[in-house]
């Protein structure tokens, strides 16, 4: 993500944006690490390593989104067909997509494990769907920008240079 106002690349959260501003103000000549690698190392040092199982869950959620989009598209395209007597393909429900993702992406075979993972995926999918259904929030973005500026100003008082 490249923000035009702060020119901070790939920084999603306020914490990432502040850390990236500090990293940009203090170029490192002793290591070959890029600024993004340094940001990743700083985030790992502060909040811990990103769990691999979280990555797999993200992949499963992405699989669900793509599966549902493909099913909906196939359903709509088949409705335009010349032979209306043909049965239209069924679209997987969110629960069915979650169970399919648990099997296909997470590689689960045990029915109990599939059901548990499907419940987690279902909740995560529904939660994200609610969040993503809203328009872009310009007010929230402005408040985050203001927070980053205030934090950088506070850091400057402690002689910690930042560059937005």
Image (cartoon, rainbow, N blue to C red):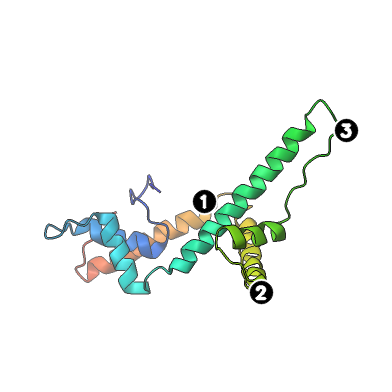
In the rendered image, the residue lying farthest to the front is 109
Asked if labels 2 and 3 touch by Cβ distance under 8 angstroms, the answer is: no
Q: Give the crowd class for mark 2: few <14, some 14-19, many >=20 residues within 10 Å.
A: few
Q: Nearer the viewer, residue 46 or 80?
A: 80
Residue 139 visible to an observer of this rendering:
yes
Give the image location of residue 33, x and y in percent: 21, 57
Q: Secondary structure at mark 2?
A: helix
Give the image location of residue 121, x and y in percent: 62, 64
For label 1, the residue is: 138
For label 2, the residue is: 112
At horizontal 40% and vertical 68% (from top left) the residue drawn is 50
Q: Nearer the viewer, residue 145 or 110?
A: 110
Left or right: residue 42 compared with residue 117 = left
Give the Cα distance between marks 1 and 2. Answer: 43 Å
For label 3, the residue is: 85
In the rendered image, the residue lying farthest to the left is 30
> Which quarter of the picture shows residue 108?
bottom right
Label count reads: 3
Q: Which is nearer the N-term, disc 1 or disc 2? A: 2
Q: Which is nearer the N-term, disc 3 or disc 2? A: 3
At horizontal 29% and vertical 67% (from top left) the residue drawn is 42
Give the image location of residue 101, x and y in percent: 61, 58
């Amino acid at each position: 993500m490249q923000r035009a106002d702060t020119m901070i690349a790939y920084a999603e959260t306020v914490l990432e944006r502040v850390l990236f501003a500090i990293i940009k103000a203090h170029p490192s000549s002793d290591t070959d690490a890029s600024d993004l690698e340094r940001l990743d190392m700083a985030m790992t040092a502060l909040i811990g390593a990103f769990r691999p199982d979280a990555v797999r869950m993200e992949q499963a959620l992405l699989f669900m989104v793509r599966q549902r989009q493909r099913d909906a598209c196939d359903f709509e395209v088949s409705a335009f067909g010349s032979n209306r007597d043909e049965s239209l393909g069924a679209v997987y429900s969110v629960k069915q997509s979650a169970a399919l993702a648990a099997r296909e992406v997470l590689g689960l075979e045990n029915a109990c494990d599939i059901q548990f993972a499907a419940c987690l995926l279902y909740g995560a999918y529904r939660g994200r769907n609610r969040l993503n259904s809203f328009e872009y929030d310009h007010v929230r973005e402005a408040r985050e920008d203001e927070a980053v500026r205030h934090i950088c100003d506070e850091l400057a008082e402690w002689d910690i240079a930042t560059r937005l």
